[in-house]
Image (spheres, helix red, strand yellow):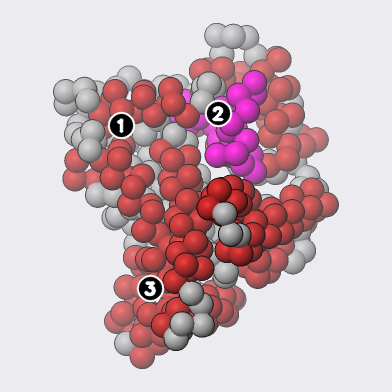
Amino acid sequence: MNTITLDRAGAGKPAARVPIADDRAMLKAAADLTRDLTAARPAIYWADFLASAVIGYGALAVAIMAGPLWLTIVAGLVAMLALYRGMSFIHELTHVKHASLPGFRAGYNALIGVPMLVPSFMYEGVHNLHHARTRYGTSEDPEYLPLALMKPWSLPVFVVIAALAPIALIFRYGVLSPLSLVIPPLRRVVVERFSALAINPDFRRRMPEGAFAAQWNRIEAACAIWAMTLIALVATGTMSWRTFAIILVIASGVAVVNQLRTLVAHLWENDGEAMTVTAQYLDTVNVPPPATLPALWAPVGLRYHALHHLLPGLPYHSLGEAHRRISAVLDMDSPYHKASYAGMPGLVAKIARSTMLPR
């Protein structure tokens, strides 16, 4: 799941790379060892998601009503992590068969998507392009930038700009959505450029059609009403600036943590050429146990991001078991083990060093 765009202008052209051939043994093992893990378990999804929402909003309420500053900070941190976990289920919505999780899209939008202005349609129909065999890592991938080949300053800008996401979303839904209803050319711009969780500034989204368009319009209307309500509550003094500031800081924290996770989700070393499945896997990151912090900053299966690119249809609750099975069977010289890393600091350092290399 990605949020903020950054210009490709700083990208440099690296030396020619030797194409990475697909490792058939790894691909076969991944498929054969996980055939019994493909079914989504609704009880796990709903319990995890609802607990994240309840804890998140409960902690947000404590942060708003708390007297001592320390309690506001602690409750705000809990709210940020819990709501971030809840928001991360948008990634599952793009992969899971909705018939196996009746009502989950509606539940996500009601509890997280609309209140946090990150509705499901901003990822559905977008994220699947990132997994397309011939699109990954190319200019047609909405979720890819060659960050490791760009200038050093681009990394901090990529992360810091995410803090502005809550304000941008309120403006997108509270101002641009209603205006686009009466200005048709603006509507196309809003859909094409401001309706996708993408980081590729060249990506343009297609106008929705059919049943998806009707669903989109209903959810966007709810987001617009909520955003305009927030603006009105603050403008009239019904909601205090302190309360609004706490909400914005927590929402900004969610966006920044997600952007940091995005920064280390891939190695970002591809220069635009189509890649084999194995090459895509090696450009992606797993942060498996014994590391513990990734459970917080890469929740809902995102700590197994490389494995997810091998098996995108596997539900998040099966990824840990799948990783254990595959790791136990494949030799240590298999490419499978080369995508596992210890944690975020080393990955950030690796990408930062790459940006400093001469091009």
Q: Amino acid at mark 3?
A: Phe
Residue mark closest to the camera, 1 vs 3: 3
**Earlier-in-chain disc, 1 versus 2:** 1
Residue nearest the observer in this picture, 224 or 195: 224
**Residue visible at 61% across and 18% down in the picture:** 25
Q: Amino acid at mark 2?
A: Asn
Q: Position of residue 179 (x, y in %)?
A: 36, 85
Magenta stretch, main secondary structure, is: loop
Q: Callout 1: helix, strand or loop?
A: helix
| Residue 189 falls left or right of residue 135 | left
Q: Could you classify mark 3 by the number of other residues whose Cα lies within 10 Å: few (under 14), some (14-19), or many (20 or more)?
A: some
**Residue visible at 44% across and 34% down in the picture:** 264
Residue at the spot of label 3: 171
CA distance separating discs 1 and 2: 18 Å
Residue 55 in sight: yes
Where 291 sits versus 42, above or below?
A: above
Q: Could you classify mark 2 by the number of other residues whose Cα lies within 10 Å: few (under 14), some (14-19), or many (20 or more)?
A: many
Q: Amino acid at mark 1?
A: Ala
> Which picture quadrant has residue 321?
top right
Q: Position of residue 156 (x, y in %)?
A: 30, 40
Among all residues in the image, which is located at the extreme right?
43
Q: Which residues are magenta?
A: 282-308
Specify whether residue 102 is painted magenta.
Answer: no
- Per the rendering, the mark at residue 260 is none
CA distance separating discs 2 and 3: 35 Å
Q: Callout 3: helix, strand or loop?
A: helix
Residue at the spot of label 2: 286
| Residue 188 falls left or right of residue 66 | left
- Per the rendering, the mark at residue 148 is 1
